[in-house]
Image (spheres, grey):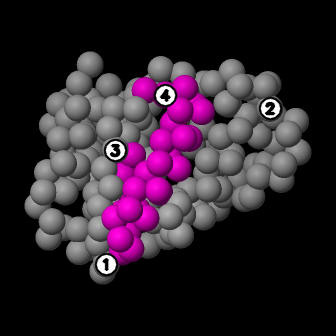
Amino acid sequence: MKVLAISGSPRKGNTEAMLKRLLDGAKSKGAAIELVLLRDRKIELCDGCDTCWGTNKGCHIMDGMQPLYGKLFSADAIVFGSPNYFSNYSGLMKLFVDRLNPYCSPSRFRGKRAAIVCVGGQDLHHVKRCGQALQFVVKELKMELVGSIVAKAEKPLEILKNGKVMQQCFGLGEKLAEA
């Protein structure tokens, strides 16, 4: 079992901490794990050419997204993690999601397991909308959603003090890695 976590946060903080804890849970069940920080990759905007749609041949833009495709295809499970920005996922995550377009129809992700982690400083009902937006992505990719965690945290790494949420992350990682 290979679990790949994608962090859409522009900084080291709560999203990354939650993803690392989730990966700890997956690793405890024997999964091979990897964390991808989108902030460390140069991913260009989708240019809307739509020549990729329905081809499964890939995107013509040669950038930091190209090496990610192979990682995504070889993963058994993918975790989407994002801070909450205006009741939605971050711009980094949006760039990433848009660039999945070449592999949506037919879906190269069909049947893969998925999990979602969203965290933000606004009221929890706003953070839940971030999670719902990512649930839509998972559904469109024809993935199996194993679980979702939304949490409130104001300051960087504040989530580490929330034992309940960190335990939920570990547990979701275990569940994700179980066959």
Q: Residue under label 2, please give it.
A: 53
Going 23% across and 32% down the picture, which residue do you hit? 175
* Of 43 and 97, the residue lying toward us: 97
Q: Amino acid at mark 2?
A: Trp
* Of 39 and 171, the residue lying toward us: 171
Residue found at the very far left of the displayed protein: 163
Instruction: Report how far apart the C-alphas of labels 1 and 4 lie in the structure.
Output: 31 Å
Q: Which mark is residue 121?
A: none
Describe residue 134's horizontal placement relative to residue 46 as left or right: left
Q: How would you rate the neighbour count of disc 3 (Cα within 10 Å): few for under 14, some for 14-19, many for 20 or more?
A: many
- Rendering coords of residue 12 (x, y %): 37, 71
Q: Residue under label 1, please give it.
A: 154
Q: Residue under label 3, please give it.
A: 148
Q: Amino acid at mark 4?
A: Met
Q: Residue under label 4, please give it.
A: 143
Q: How would you rate the neighbour count of disc 2 (Cα within 10 Å): few for under 14, some for 14-19, many for 20 or more?
A: some
* Of 134 and 15, the residue lying toward us: 134
Q: Above or below — where is 35 with respect to 55?
A: below
Residue interval drawn in magenta? 116-144
Q: How would you rate the neighbour count of disc 1 (Cα within 10 Å): few for under 14, some for 14-19, many for 20 or more?
A: few
Determine contact: label 2, label 3, CB under 8 Å: no
N-term mark: 1 or 3: 3
Which quadrant of the figure contains the C terminus?
Answer: top left
Describe residue 122's horizontal placement relative to residue 45 as left or right: left
Does residue 139 belong to the magenta stretch? yes
Element assignment for label 4: loop
Going 28% across and 57% down the picture, which residue do you hit? 18
Does residue 24 belong to the magenta stretch? no
